[in-house]
Amino acid sequence: MNGTLEPLFFWLISAVIVLSALAVVFMKNIVHSALFLIVTFVGMAGIYALLQADFIAAVQILVYAGAIAILIVFAVMLTRRGDIRASNPFNGYAIIASLACLAFLVVTVSMIFNSGFEIVESVGKSVVEPLAIAMMGDFVISFEVAALLLLEALVGAIILARGVKKEQ
Amino acid sequence: MAEYYLLGVEIATALLGLILLVMGLLVPKTHNKGIANIAIIGFIAIFGVNFLYAGTNASFLNGMYLIDPFSLFFKGLLLIAVFFTCLISKDYILEQGYGQGEYYSLVTFATLGMMIMVSAGDLITFYLGLELNTIAFVILVAFRKNCAKSTEAGIKYVLLSAMSSAVLLYGLSLVYGATKSVLLTEIAKIINQQGIQPLLLIGMIFTLAGFGFKVSAVPFHMWSPDVYEGAPTPITGFMSVASKAAAFAIFVRFFMIALAPVQETWVIVITALTVLTLVLGNLVAIPQTNIKRMLAYSSVGQAGFILLGMVAFSKLGVAAIMFHSLLYVFANMGAFGVATVVGKSIGSDQIKDYQGLWKRSPLMAAVMLICLLSLAGIPPLAGFVSKFYLFTAVIEQGHIWLAFIAIGMSMVSVYYYLIVAKAMYLGQPEEGAEPIKVPGSVQLALALCLIVLVFFGVYPTPFTNLVLDVATAFFPF
């Protein structure tokens, strides 16, 4: 990546992320919100790519933009009630919630700016290879637990969705 | 080559879970009564395996996973809790008539998740263990079909636990960002070297909120009464003891080891949580009319007592946490065992329906009384000893006012526990009420709870020595 262009891309992608995230909240139609969510996720992938974490960027697009957003749209489709054009309403707490969020933002951001960060100029050439070694090395327990977690979630989904057979 | 033999307990548990799952599919419906027995025998065997590791103090995969006396103690505790859960569940699930194999395999996976939590030496392993047990509990909570309350409880639990997991995860990511390490011991070293960053403090607050949810400390307790009420009663018992103990184990490890350098900061927040939890949990338990909701608030109050051990931040505090968590298993599983049988045969969980229980089932009334008195901390039962250690631990550190609040709230708890005792012993059963038949497996569970609570109340010395040894190995200050 050319060093002079990097800040330009960063601000561009950040603007896309912030605007599309706002659109997720303010769109009246929940399907539109879900589509803007995909834009947000792709923007996040762009940030990861700028940070030279290309594997994470690919996973972000595959899992979030691909699977999760589609899942949301499916869930909306299967559970839809009434008019889809007003399916993402605000409740009565909009003002209080935005004030709370603003206060939270101020506190967190000021804390983050007050913390010293070490800036690493470059991560190694290949990102995938060390990840693979880590997954089968030090992180092998987490890796196996994740496998069991998926099995368990699958079994659970079947149990909950199947309903009770009427045999008697 | 890593020493994989250290993982014996976890591997055996994972295998048991898979075997139970496959058996549920293969064994025909008419012959599946034995699945519960296989689970029970399996857990006894794993408990034996856990004993083989006694005295081991090793770390595995460069500190990612710890097999130390502390984690072995909590694994034993979890195995005892799951053993009682299976005993109590046996007839309950048989009557439901579906999902035997799935039920016991999910219970096993929940146990495995909690074992990984208590043994985790790094944040990622801990988080995955946490999710493994949370997902299993979500499904188990919603296991009663044709029961709107159970489904509602399941939805509430999945939404709220997802939110708390998000908060916890964000906190953990901030801690990682501030220290650039996921290893608990490394985190402490790095904080000592580079000093306390503001980022770390935010991370600490977030993780505290996440842990507060898991141990149901006020003000993060809102989910527990609804979920406890809707869940199948054996699962309520299992959640209230095992999930809480495992969460406390990693809570203690994270705050007392990884965040030990910022102890002066977190102790203020945790003290506030402790006072709130003690006062609110115990006072709100008084007006409850449903036994499961009453026990839910009582377990919130018990979390407050256990938090005292963290405020103390001493060897005795850790020992008292372990002592109390283990006795809490017996007392609560006994109470929920009775609630399971009564709820099933009367079809109601209201305290007023316990009227005259002693005439309908003397054993259950006796066990319920002993368990509740132990929870209240009445001598000579074991609950008195463990509360005594908790109070001593905080007084030793000079927080006498806190001990006063705790003792006061302990008095309050006697009142609401005795409401149940009054209904059971002084009330008259309804006309024509028949004796309640207690299934053999539940009888065994109740008898064991009774014996342990009385025995360790009268003669706690060997057990006290054990927890003090473990605490010394864990927290050598």
Image (spheres, coloured by chain):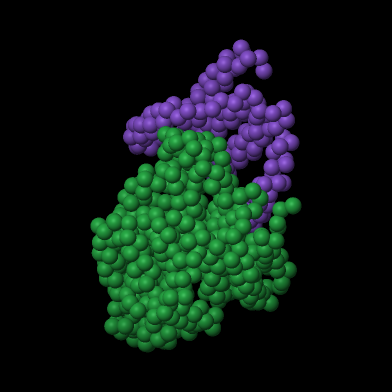
Chain colours: A purple, B green
Q: Is residue B36 visible?
A: no
Say above or below: B362 vs B72: below
Can you give x and y, in whole percent of width and height, for residue B376 in the image? 33, 71
User: Residue at (66%, 50%) from the top-left corner?
Assistant: B61
B378 versus A157 height, above or below: below
Q: Position of residue B418 (x, y in %)?
A: 30, 74
Residue at the extreme front of the image, as rendered: B477
Which residue is pictured at 66% across the width and 28% down the height? A123
- Residue found at x 39% / y 77%: B457
Could you say which is closer to the camera, residue B357 or residue A83?
A: B357
Q: Is residue B276 visible?
A: yes
**Residue B336 or residue B317, whichever sits in front:** B317
Residue drawn at x 51%, y 39% is B190
Report the number of discs: 0
Q: Residue furthest top?
A: A4
Tell me if residue A28 comes above or below residue A139 in the rendering: above
Q: Nearer the viewer, residue B354 or A130?
A: A130
Percent x, y of residue A147: 67, 51
Instruction: Give percent across and percent down for residue B404.
Output: 25, 61
In the picture, residue B375 is in which quadrant?
Answer: bottom left
